[in-house]
Image (spheres, rainbow, N blue to C red):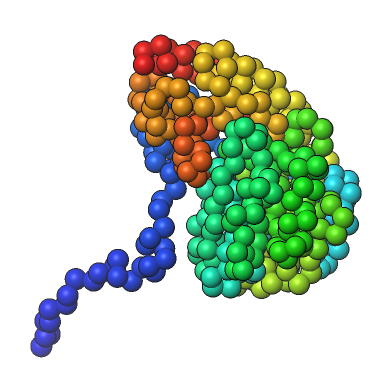
Amino acid sequence: MTILREVPAWNAEAHISRTVRDLPPSGIRRFFDLVNEMDEAISLGVGEPDFVTPWHVREACIYSLESGYTSYTSNKGMPELREAIADFTKEQLGLDYDPAEQILVTTGVSEAVDLAFRATLNPGDEVIVPEPCYVAYVPDIILAGGVPRQISTRIDDGFRVTPESIMPAITEKTKALVLSYPNNPTGAIMTRSDLESIADLVVEHDLLVISDEVYGMLTYSGMHASFAQLDGMSERTIILNGLSKSHAMTGWRIGYALGDPMVIGAMTKIHQYTMLCAPIMSQMAAIEALLHGEEEMLKMKHEYNLRRRLFVSGLNRIGLPCIEPQGAFYAFPSIIDTGLSSEAFAERLLREQKVAVVPGNVFGQSGEGFLRCSYATSREELIEALDRIETFLDKL
């Protein structure tokens, strides 16, 4: 005979980590969901190239599958890919990294960011994060047990970080400083001179620098400058980079980290227990992109530059002040004069004119009063978006 017993309802929420439960959802996601509900919306919200990965790179992937490359690779990534990354970095930054000990291939730069924090932070360690910034830094620091110390950058400084902005945030618990240039969402860059101005502070307080350079190849005025290029700074810098933005390879999920062998070794330990390795077919494609992808990469950069000039001049013409972004593919216009909050402006613009942008406050409090607009879309759509935004402004 079956004995029925009463089983209390399972409380799933009680089994969720408090840390995870208290994390807010990504502010970008809500706008993506709204866009998906609409027909004929123009999206300037997505941080993704509108180009398809070049054919020769896709062909390398197809060839790898036809040849039976379907297995795991070394945790650190294929030796051939790490060699290609070392050569590419030497060519672009003039820096030498040992492919065997100082390079880790990750599943996108997002994983590399997470690993960098988890491998270096102890509970309570503080990390200085200049904002506005990429939305994952703060949650990743919290998930690693660290404490984010956000500092504001200002439009008057071109959204660059300065010694004066860093100094007040330093305490005895400060472990690291995040540098993310060219910056998402402002398009700001740091020049070599800017970086040198903060190097003494980094040394004096023995800070680790976590330098996210995924937009480094999309620098429009001069060459990209890395903190690791400064004298004596490469050993205290973790460079995070990848092919998503520069080579239109977002879906392939190939990122990498460069740094001191001990730090890369620690990051590899976590990678071993989580991702194991990046997909082998993506790694094969990445080798092709790094060895033979410069021409296509430069074509895309040229087109982004044309769009940048068109869109930013258009924003200023219709009354949304915008500094000229020097990197990435984002414009960050001010909407302060409209009297609307970033959230209210973005939501009304989407509902009334079907143009999707991202509220600046999603990237930190100092982003309030601004919008992130991606110009990684066609010139025709950018012109149409400007017309719609102007119509919206006229009705306010």
**In the image, 96: left or right of 350?**
right
Residue 224: % across, % down: 78, 40
In this view, 70 is above or below 224:
below
Q: Position of residue 85 (x, y in %)?
A: 81, 53
185 to 356, vertically: above or below: below
- Answer left or right for 346 relative to 100: left
Which residue is at the front of the view, 155 or 258?
155
In the depicted view, which residue is nearer to us: 382 or 58? 382
Above/below status of 196 relative to 125: above
Which quarter of the rendered picture does the N terminus lie within? bottom left
**Residue sitting at 63 percent across and 37 percent down?**
159
Query: Looking at the image, which residue is at 38% across and 67% down?
Result: 18
Residue at the image point whose x is 62% and y is 32% from the top:
156
Image quarter hosting the C terminus: top left
Depth order, front residue of 47/368: 368
Indicate the quadrant where residue 113 lies. Answer: bottom right
Q: Is residue 230 left or right of residue 19?
A: right
Q: In which quarter of the image is residue 234?
A: bottom right
Name above or below for residue 165 compared with residue 103: above
Q: Where is residue 98 in the image (x, y as percent from the top left)?
A: 86, 63
- Tally the numbered discs: 0
Percent across and percent down for residue 302 are 75, 25
User: Do we see residue 246 in this rendering?
Assistant: no
Q: Can residue 170 be seen in this view?
A: yes
The residue drawn where x is 54% and y is 52% is 150
